[in-house]
Image (spheres, rainbow, N blue to C red):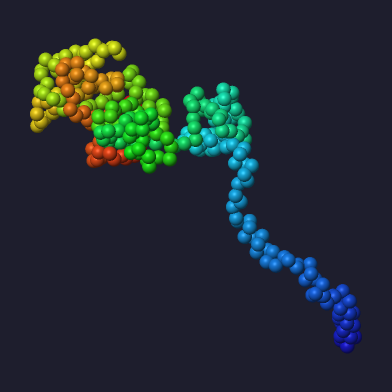
Amino acid sequence: MNNNKSSRRETNKKYEKKEKKEFKKPDYKKDTKKFEGKKDFHKKTFVSSFKKKPPKKSEEKEGIRLNKYIANSGICSRREADVFIQNGVVKINGKVVDELGYKVMPGDEVFFDGKYIRPEKNVYVLLNKPKGYISTTKDEKARKTVMDLVENASPYRLYPVGRLDRQTTGVLLLTNDGDLTKKLTHPSYGVKKIYHATLDKKVSASDFEQLIEGLRFDEGIARVDKISYIEGSPKNEVGIEIHIGWNRIVRRMFERLGYEVERLDRVMFAGLTKKTLKRGYWRILTELEVNTLKML
């Protein structure tokens, strides 16, 4: 037993001597020089990894990635756009582009499935137009236009769908949806419009018949689809349903028959009415209204 204890003591002494030789006391002054200027190094690295880096100016000048351009046009998501691009659905400046990383530059014309697209959301605004405003985007004589009334309705440029003359009031649609505009203004679609006309005298029954049979103008024969007196109003106030969209055609038809139109108000256009909308005010169409227009 004594021999075993003495052998253990000798072994422990040897190990302690070896450990003392291998372990060196740190030179703090010398070692800390390595980390001078690196205070809170890990903290800075951790925080900086979560900071969003601003885009480089060179990247902004290089254009927009094609999938982002398509997504911003409201067609589909970026992932879906990548699939369409690879399938050769997209043309830029007349050439098919199937490269996913392609950048669209300013001035490029992009077509998706044969239709021209641009990176902006379609906006649909319904205006109850007052008197004294022209249904154009600009006027050379600096007169008031409907654009003055809807300037805060959209960040994108809007265009009137059809026109109402300066003195005519009522429903007017404005949008940046070119396809829908063409559809609503093309004669083949026969978009219905209803007007409330106030004349300088009572409209005779024989003139009702002439308006329905049609009157000849330079553009062709103009007919009203329906006409009737306004219930509860004098006989010089009539309601007219018509689908043609020639310039000032309602006024011209009555003038041909010897009437003067004192007031003309469009109360409905393509199913849209101005109920609850005060004169000179506008509102954004609901999703249901937009879908209904597209199904016409």
As drawn, 234 above or below 3: above
Residue sitting at x 37%, y 40%: 151
Left or right, 202 with reference to 162: left
Instruction: Work out whether residue 178 or residue 252 is closer to the camera in this orientation and state it.
Output: 252
Q: Position of residue 39 (x, y in %)?
A: 70, 67
Q: Position of residue 77 (x, y in %)?
A: 51, 38
Quadrant assignment, res 206: top left
Residue 129 in sight from this viewpoint:
yes
Instruction: Work out whether residue 174 or residue 16 is closer to the camera in this orientation and state it.
Output: 174
Quadrant assignment, res 212: top left
Left or right, 45 with reference to 192: right
Extreme residue in the bottom direction:
2
Q: Position of residue 81 (x, y in %)?
A: 54, 34
Q: Position of residue 175 (x, y in %)?
A: 38, 33
- Position of the C terminus by quadrant: top left
Quadrant assignment, res 36: bottom right
Residue sitting at x 64%, y 42%: 58
Residue sitting at x 41%, y 32%: 176
Left or right, 7 with reference to 263: right
Residue sitting at x 22%, y 30%: 265
How many labels were placed on the picture? Answer: 0
